Amino acid sequence: MSASNRDEVRLNRDKSVFARFIHQWDLQVLVIPSLILILVFSYIPMYGVIMAFQEYKLGEKLGFSEWVGLKQFVYLFSEPAFPRVLRNTLIISGLKILINFPIPIIFAVMINEMRAKQFKKVVQTVSYLPHFISWVVCATLMFDMFSTDGGAINELLKWVGVTKSGIPFFNRSNYFWGLTVATDLWKELGWNSIIFIAAIAGVDPQLYEAADIDGATRIQKIWYITVQTIKPTIIILLIFTVGGMLNANFDQIMMLTNQMSNAQLRETGDVIDTFVYRFGLQQMRYSFATAASLFKTVINFVLLLITNHVAGKLGDTALL
């Protein structure tokens, strides 16, 4: 590096944050809309958390209701339905992490290993499409496919001799967890694999060439080159996924349970998000619902910190 370049680097380092901000004003302007969006929809609503410690009634000015301390949390933990709701949330989210997190990685590796470019494009396009369909439409499709009256799945089961009259999948609670995981996988498989496909595209081709010279098999190249190279991406996404473990996809649950009107599915389909919706909007217990949401957020944050800490201890990949 020449002396003039070193002086320029030192000058830039010595500049204050404000001076660098002014110097890069055109780039900062591009960020402003995103900052405003986060401020309006993420930070300002945090003031509403105070409702969890008050007895808020509709029409009262936010923050000026009767202060009740931890009373709402006492009600929450003593609510008979809460253990069932927490169990359902943890099981559904846990199954999605165990099953629906690794499968997009495997799918991305399989896409990368395809040699027929046209076929690869068709597979990618077909796998992406369900993501852009709303859960309202998806639920309708699922009801039709699993219907006992001419549904494709039940007709196939009848044809292979598994059942004679069909299985009412959406009228039996013991099938709901499996259906939730399977429909989420079908809808989001292609979309969730995009970031892994992009990470694989950044792998240095010379690594594969060197492996060929050393006589590595295809499986060995996948494991020791592809997977190990995208490992930081996998870990970061796993941290975020575990950090949102108590988010069981409200839209999906509501649509598959017909907006919780199917009483037979409530035993296994009622999660924290639907619990908050039922008590907060339908019964207008706003402070109680806010306490439940705050509990969920705190647990998610703790899980995020724990997962990030474990990832940092096991390797170099962590958020902080």
Image (cartoon, rainbow, N blue to C red):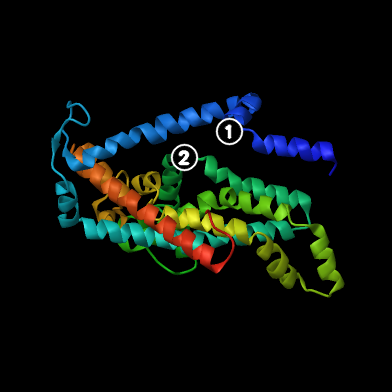
On the picture, is 161 further left or further right than 317? left
Q: CA distance from mark 2 to mark 1?
A: 44 Å
Tell me which residue sits at (84%, 67%) in the image: 210
- Residue 172 visible here: no
**Three-letter code for the amino acid on which mark 1 is drawn:** Val
Q: Quadrant of residue 85?
A: bottom left
Position of residue 92 in the picture relative to residue 277 (left or right) = right
Residue behind mark 2: 134
SS at circle 2: loop
- Height in image: 319 above or below 314? above
Q: Nearer the viewer, residue 158 or 302?
A: 302
Of callouts 2 and 1, the N-terminal one = 1
Residue that mark 1 sits on: 17
Q: Quadrant of the N terminus?
A: top right
Q: Position of residue 36 (x, y in %)?
A: 47, 28
The spot of residue 245 in percent (x, y) is 40, 56
Image location of residue 232, percent across then percent down: 61, 59
The label nearer to you, 2 versus 1, is 1
Place residue 30 in its image quadrant. Answer: top right
One can see residue 3 in this view: yes
